[in-house]
Amino acid sequence: MPLFKKRTVGKPGEWYYCLEHKKVEEGPECPAKDRFGPYATRKEAEHAMATARERNLEWENDPKWHDAPAGGAGDDD
């Protein structure tokens, strides 16, 4: 008997977007590695990919998350 059981049944009202099947699910039907969520509404889950793209773009353009020093190289006066 395994130590940990996989939770396959979600709470009512939990919505997920399955990356494998490209569809919205109520409750986790697919493994966690294949889904985004939980979302509060079906509409939020439907827009999961757009939300991820927006967040990735914000992160890529956020100066706090770049490894390069703010002043640039060679500013060690």
Image (cartoon, rainbow, N blue to C red):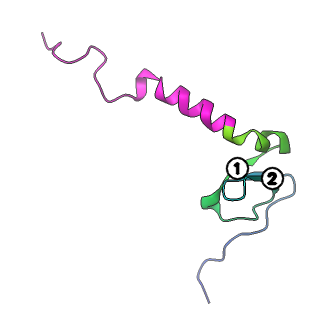
The residue where tag 1 is placed is 37
49 and 15: which is toward the camera: 49
Left or right of 56 on screen, residue 7: right
Q: Residue at x 67, y 35 (%)?
A: 51
Point 15% across, 15% down: residue: 74
19, 69: nearer the viewer = 19
Report the Cα–Cα distance between label 2 and label 1.
Answer: 8 Å
User: In the image, what residue occupies the spot 78% across and 39% down?
Assistant: 44
In the rendered structure, which segment of residues is drawn in magenta?
A: 50-77
Q: Which residue is under mark 2?
A: 14
Q: Quadrant of residue 43?
A: top right
In the rendered image, residue 19, in percent from the top left (x then y), is placed at 66, 54
Q: Nearer the viewer, residue 68 or 1?
A: 68
View extreme (top): residue: 77
Q: Work out whether 65 lies above or below 17.
A: above
Split into 4 quadrants, where in the image is the C terminus?
top left
